[in-house]
Amino acid sequence: MPAMQHGEFFIGVDGGGTGCRARIEDADGNALGTGIGGPAALRFGLDRSLSEVTKACLAAVADAGLDPSVLGCAHAAVGLAGVGRKGLLEKLVMMQHPFASVRYVNDATVACIGAHAGRDGGIVIVGTGSVGFAVVKGREFRIGGYGFPISDEGSGADLGLQAIRQALRAYDNRSFGTTLTRDVMRRFGDDPFEAVAWMDRATATDYAALAPLVMRHADAGDAAARRIVMEAAEQIGDLIRRLLDWGAQRIAMLGGLASSIEPWLAPDVQRRLVPAEGDAIDGALRLARQIANDSRQHHVAIETTHVY
């Protein structure tokens, strides 16, 4: 085994509903390798989630040219979508893992740490789902993000749902049809019961697949699409304003739809946004180093007590 493998390593993981990403760094902060795995949100099950986390980490180790056993020398922080669900965190910490140490947190936590380089601030994630999250003076605040379809307003999944609703209303002549509503219905062969059959098996990701179509028509001036996007922007704006009320002076928008929705936000909300300084993996790595350092200081304190 090469000598470089005997040092201390740190791994940051971002495990979401569409995929899992990992990066390994050495003790000096040098990025050594990256890896990806499949969807790792906890709604898919604990075993599958942790399997994808391990797969992404092993891929990062392989990309770094290291032996898989190096995971035993690595301190990891893993952000997972769905950690807040009742009882899941308690089950997670009891499960076996290949790392020297590991901390599981919500994916929004590491995203916020990364976006503001560890400083106080807030984020609004706008992707398949949506959520607002902030860290202010050591306290965490979360708003929304309870899951589609009961929550996640303004998200990609919500855009898709509203588009289908508008399309079905237009099909019934309950509202005026537009290019968007006609395009949506064509996806179901102009048969509303095909939409019903699709609904029975559709996931949030399936609904979110319609979001780019909605945004494209909204930007082109389609009346139905504009109404949907304007409502979504109001919902996202409410998340941002609520985080500001909690004292988060820096707010960054993250997620696959963030750049598309931002121009639709009210001017006063847009003025309060700042660019993200890093991503969720940056935040996870920062957290992994902090936890490892706190652990070392704790052991030193115990040893000092024993000496005296």
Image: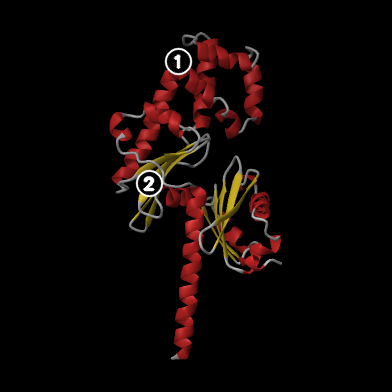
Q: Residue at x 57, y 34 (%)?
A: 204
Q: Could you tell me which residue is drawn at 33 percent across and 33 percent down?
A: 270
Q: Which mark is residue 122?
A: 2
Colouring: secondary structure
Q: Is residue 112 left or right of residue 96?
A: left
In the displayed structure, would residue 265 be above or below residue 42? Answer: above
The picture places residue 264, in percent across and down from the top left corner, at 38, 26
Residue furthest to the bottom: 308
Q: From the top left corner, tell me how far across and down residue 2 is, in percent.
A: 68, 66
* Amino acid beneath label 2: Gly
Residue 226 at least partly seen? yes
Across and down, in percent, residue 33 comes to 61, 52
Q: Are marks 2 and 1 in contact (CB under 8 Å)?
A: no
Helix, strand or loop for disc 1: loop
Q: Amino acid at mark 1?
A: Ala
Measure how far apart labels 2 and 1 are at the Cα level: 32 Å
Query: How far across and down, in percent of the image, does residue 101 sit?
Result: 58, 65
Q: Above or below — where is 268 with respect to 135? A: above
Comparing 168 with 276, the one in front is: 276
Residue 234 sits in quarter: top left
Give the quarter of the figure containing the N terminus. Answer: bottom right
Q: Which residue is mark 1?
A: 220
Visible residue check, residue 96: no
Near-viewer residue (115 or 123): 115
Secondary structure of the residue carrying tag 2 is: strand
Give the residue displayed 66% in from the left and 51% down from the top: 63
Q: Counting residues from the N terminus, which is met first, the one under dot 2 or under dot 1? A: 2
- The quarter of the image holding the C terminus is bottom left
